[in-house]
Structure formats: C-alpha cells, structure tokens
Amino acid sequence: MINYDNYINEGYFRQNLYHFTTLYPLKKIFEEDKLDLGYYDNPVNGENKRTLSLTRNKNFKLERYSTLILEFDGDLLYQDYKIIPYDYYMQSGKETKTKSDPNRKHIVQSEEIILKPLYDVHKYLVSVEFYDYNDIYKETLLIEKLLELNSEIKFKYKNKVINYGF
C-alpha cells in the first residue's frame, strides 16, 4: 500500500488561525465585537471581493504594518464560517512573478479567507499578542470588557502570557 504522507503539503485540518492588525482597528474590533472585511478587493474565482484575511502561519509577521496578532480557535471558526484556502498570486495570475522573485521565496503565507465579517469575536478569540508592551496598557478598559465576555482569552507580549488578575 502507498503511503501518501510524504506527498501531502497541505490539507484540510483544523488549527488555530491568526489575523495581524494594529491598535486602532483593535479598538473597533473589541468595541463592536466584530472583525470586518478588509478595505481592498481581492480576486476570488474571477471576481473582485472584499475578504477577511487569516493565516495558519503565526510566524508570518508583518511588523512594519502590524502591532499585534489575534489568534482564533480554528475548530470553532470552521463550525460557523466557510474558510477558504487562498493564494493572492495564483488568483491574480501573478504566480510566475512570485516564483521568480527571490524576496518572496521565503514567505509562506498559508492564507485563508472568509467572505463575510466575523461576529462575536470574543467567542473565537484565543489570544491577543502585542509587539509593544505599552500598547497593552493603553487599552486596559477594553481588555477588561473583553475578558468579562470570555475569561479564557490570553493576552501576551513576545509569546509570554500577561496575567491581569481579574
């Protein structure tokens, strides 16, 4: 019998998903308990659509654009949302440019998209990891409110959990 484990690079299995953002949108996300679709249209099966972008790759940090990472429970998301594997370069017809660009060869996005906003963020949120320690204390009231909705959410700085003592 043939063992296909050596041939499979990606597959459908549930794991946590990550969304990179900045402090300003985080305020809106926490206040509305909703993660909206992105601002720009992306090609999806021949149509331009706004999407909610997530990744399976926690190490895909865009530090110049992001100041924090939202980690979501993949099992719960897959139960309530259709999650679609996505490759922008393949969808836009630019896959040959990506393969030939030495600056992009090391980037593994492992991108997933959702075609509608994510409601009840507190239900799916596992952790929030900050890049800047000071940002944590700027939003203490919102963090406390979020913890009242879901006390299991962890807040982190450089992969270490911060204890609030609530």
Image (cartoon, helix red, strand yellow):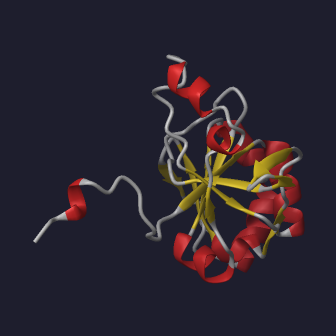
Between 143 and 20, the one lying in front of the other is 20
Identity of the residue drawn at 54% across and 70% down: 74
Between 35 and 1, the one lying in front of the other is 1
Identity of the residue drawn at 73% across and 78% down: 149
Residue 15 x/y as whole percent:
47, 66
Left or right of 41 in this view: 110: left
Identity of the residue drawn at 70% across and 37% down: 66
Compared with residue 125, is residue 157 higher up or lower down, i.e. above or below?
above
Residue furthest to the bottom: 79
Left or right of 55 in this view: 33: right
Identity of the residue drawn at 67% across and 73% down: 82
Residue furthest to the left: 1
What is the quadrant of the N terminus in the image?
A: bottom left
Residue 57 x/y as whole percent:
50, 48
Residue 69 x/y as whole percent:
63, 48
Compared with residue 6, is residue 32 higher up or lower down, i.e. above or below?
below
Residue 133 x/y as whole percent:
64, 38
What is the quadrant of the C terminus in the image?
A: bottom right
Count of number-bearing discs:
0
Between 115 and 36, the one lying in front of the other is 115
Q: Which quadrant of the structure image shows residue 47?
A: bottom right
Compared with residue 66, is residue 17 higher up or lower down, i.e. above or below?
below
